[in-house]
Each structure stands twice: as structure tokens, then as C-alpha cells.
Amino acid sequence: MPNTDSMIPACDPDRCAAAGCTPTVCVGAGVASNHELFARSQRAIPGGVNSSIRAFRAVGGEPYVVASASGATITDVEGTTYYDLVQSYGAIILGHAHPAITAAVGAAVVSGTSYGAPTPREMKLAEAIAERVPSCERVRLMNSGTEATSTAIRLARGVTGRDRIVTFAGNFHGATDALLVAGGSGVATLGLPGTAGVPDAAVAETMVAPYNQVPDLDDRVAAVIVEPIAANMGVVAPVPGFLEGLRAECDRVGALLIFDEVITGFRVGTGGAQAKYDVSPDITCFGKLIGGGLPIGGVGGRADVMEQLSPLGKVFHAGTLSGNPLATAAGLAALETLTPDVYIELMARARHLAAGLRDACAAAGFAASFPVVGTLVGIVCGDDAGTVHDFDDAKRTDEAAYAAFFQAMLAEGVAMAPGAYEAIFVGLAHTDEVIAAITEAAGRAAVVAAAG
Ligand SMILES: *Cc1c(COP(=O)(O)O)cnc(C)c1O
């Protein structure tokens, strides 16, 4: 077996000092390049990543390996700093290492990191969510958005005594077996497993419908789960009547309506997408920014539904690290900073950034549109992209053109998500100056991308 450590250069104090190497980066491994570290990661971690899209397979090349981040920027182990439009895929909204978050976590950590018993802080975060999102009379905290959607599905099935789940093509609900389905196109169909490892039986009761069309339900349906703004196939707004129609159709057959607000919760406004569109779900899934950048998930909903969860009810849920003291400290700090005024500002910035990117691409002759829904910005590349209402529309995006733009932006110092269907995340750290710098970079990048 080769000595893998020999691939990493030994620590050289002069090189370290010149590169501004920090102890976290160096750890005795020398000033390694992104490539060297990622090669070593690939020997320890499958594909070198702990979440598959990070591997750059969709855009080519290798990821930058992050040393640190601050505000709107992220810095890799080679010392290159990028403007960051990923913001941990939406887990960050105040900007990286925001003082309110680091202070809250720092103050919390000295009191212990997990207890296995109730805490005042988890109570406060549940209360803070319920105050802001009235449909959430009770909130159960957990560790990821995936855990939230799988718990919500189990809860809906347990409450209704029915098995069938309806989901929408192009919506993403994390790595939950019952929701990892490949749908047909155009019509509501029973799903097939969307990945190896999911047995047919796990998705036998999952139906996939086209987004933005209200499917006909029957009394076999336990729940409809939907991203109220689709943010994992670009950024797609619900057409007028879609969410209202789902509410009415669920009520007609006695099914529960689940909003997956893992991205939209506290990002599009204090009350999430359900307040923006004035449609109340029975169950809401949270994640991402309610942990202020630490691992978290949450399920909220009507008291009579939520109290079917154990220990009160018959639907089991438990978690060793659930309601974690650090994640709840960070989450509370995030929610407290997000006053209603902040969203007005963020909407203005989203429009401003999208307009800047649109103008930059148009001037360079690079075909791309940048849809804005509230505080969320999407990108659709290609000449025949058009307006996107569902997954079939979204798939018309030119993935090769996105990859070219992505690489050119990275070369200009702007990090976007390495996938054509991800959102562009604008946060409090994206000031006018930052947006101006990003749009200038985009002007140069679009020229390169347009040249192919
Ligand atoms: C990210 C995401 C999830 C999964 O959350 P994880 O914390 O990554 O497990 C679920 N639903 C939506 C809409 C998401 O964007």
C-alpha cells in the first residue's frame, strides 16, 4: 500500500509564512494545493466529498478546498478568495462568520455541546419559529432537512393511516428514500426509484406530478409534499392558484399538505413562502438557515397533527443530537437578526444582482436569464430556455453553457454552485459594492463563456 502521506509536501515554515498558512490548514501537512488536498480527501472520503454535488462533476474540474470564509467571501487553502454566491446552499443568510453567530456559538460552547436532555434554548427556537410562522403551533427540532422531510412523511402517514405520497418532478426533499423518485414527464405517475439502493417498495406509494399543476387526489393520499417556491430546479415561482389548489384538493380528500420550506423558510420573508402566498400547510419542513449555518432540521405544524409524534402519539421520532445547544444558539441568533426590514433590503439586492448579471450577460452575447422570486435568484442558460414553470421547462437549460459560465466566473473570483439547477444565494453580506464587483466579474466571464 503506498504511503499516502508522502503525496503531501512536508511542512515548510518559510512556505507556510509566505502563504499565510494557518494552523487549521497546515496541520503538519505543509502548504498543500487544492489539488493535493482533494486527492488526499478522495482516499479518505468517497469522491472526496460529504455531499455529492460538491464534487464538481456537473461542471468539470476539481473543487476549491475551503480554509475559511468571512461575510461575502470564501478563501481556499491556496489563499485565493472568491465572492461566494453559494452561502452553504442557503444555510447562511447573514454572511459567513457573522459576529452574531460566532458570538452565540462561542458563548454556548463552553457550557457543553450536547446533553441528551431538554434545554431552554431549544424551547426558545421552537417558540421563535412558531411566533413567526403561525401554522407551526408545535415544532420538533432535528438535525437536517432530510430528517425533517422523512419525519414529515412518516407523521402524515401515521396521522392519516394512508400510505400514498404525492411529490412534484424537479422538487428536492433531501436524501429521503420515499422521495428519491424518478418521475415520468408531463403527467402524474407512480414513481420509480431515483437512485440505486432505494427498493421499488420504498417508492411504490409515491406519485410524481408535474410542478405547477394541481393533481387529482383520492382518499389513498396521505400527503402532498411540495417546495412552495421550487429552488432546486433553478428558481421557479408557484403559478397563481397552484398552492391554493393543492390546499383545496388536500382538504377535499382528507390529505395533509406539507410545505418543504428548507430553503424558503426565513429566507423569502419572516413567515416563509406560506406567508408570501397566504396558503397554510398542515406540516412545514425546515432546515438550512434555522441553524445559522450549523446542522439542523425542523418539522412544524398544527398541534393536533404534531402531537401524534412520540412520546404523545404513535409516530416515532428521536435523535441523539436533536435540539443541539450550538445549532439552536446559532439559529436563534440568525432569526433575531432577520427583522422584516432585512427582507425588504434582501429583495432589493436580489433584484439588483439579477439585473446586473442579466445586463452583463446580454452585453457579452451570452444567453442567460436570472429569474427572481422574492429574495431568491435563479439562472437559466441558453437561447431556448424561456420561462420555467416545471421540470420539463427547467431541463431546457443549457448545462454546458452553465458549466462554461461557472468556470469563467470562478476564474474571475466568483464562486457559484457547481450545478446548473442550484439557486444563487444573496445575503446580508452582499452589499452594493460586492454586487458591483460580482457583476463586473460576470461581464468578463460572460465574454469568455460566450466564446465557448
Ligand atoms: C437542502 C434541502 C433539503 C435537505 O436538507 P439537508 O439538510 O441537506 O438534508 C430538503 N428540502 C429542500 C427543499 C432542500 O433545499
Image: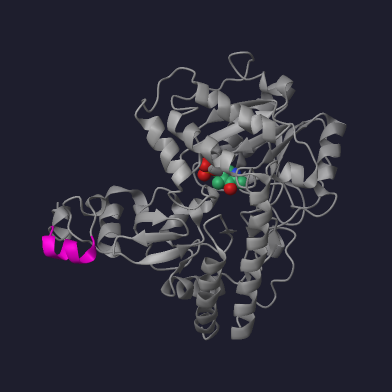
Residue drawn where x is 52% and y is 74% of the image = 405
Q: Is residue 192 above or below residue 106?
A: below
* Quadrant of the rendered image holding ligand 1: top right
Residue drawn where x is 56% and y is 69% of the image = 399
Q: Is residue 276 left or right of residue 307?
A: right
Q: Is residue 55 above or below residue 402?
A: above
Residue in front for this viewpoint, 124 or 196: 124
Q: Quadrant of residue 243?
A: top right
Q: Is residue 413 left or right of residue 166?
A: left
Q: Is residue 336 above or below residue 300?
A: below
Residue in front for this viewpoint, 43 or 113: 113
Residue in front for this viewpoint, 377 or 47: 377
Observer able to see residue 312: yes
Q: Quadrant of residue 298?
A: top right
Q: Please check the rendered image and state whether residue 12 is part of the magenta-colored stretch, yes or no.
A: yes
Residue 441 place in picture, x, y as percent? 50, 76
Q: Please check the rendered image and state whether residue 223 is part of the magenta-colored stretch, yes or no.
A: no
Q: Which residues are magenta?
A: 11-20
- Point out the residue furthest to the top here: 312
Q: Is residue 410 above or below residue 156?
A: below
Residue in front for this viewpoint, 80 or 252: 80
Residue drawn where x is 38% and y is 62% of the image = 63
Residue drawn where x is 55% and y is 72% of the image = 436
Q: Is residue 188 left or right of residue 245?
A: left
Residue 78 place in picture, x, y as percent? 29, 64
Q: Is residue 360 left or right of residue 111?
A: right
Colour pattern: one colour
Residue 99 place in picture, x, y as percent? 44, 46
Residue 393 place in picture, x, y as percent? 71, 64
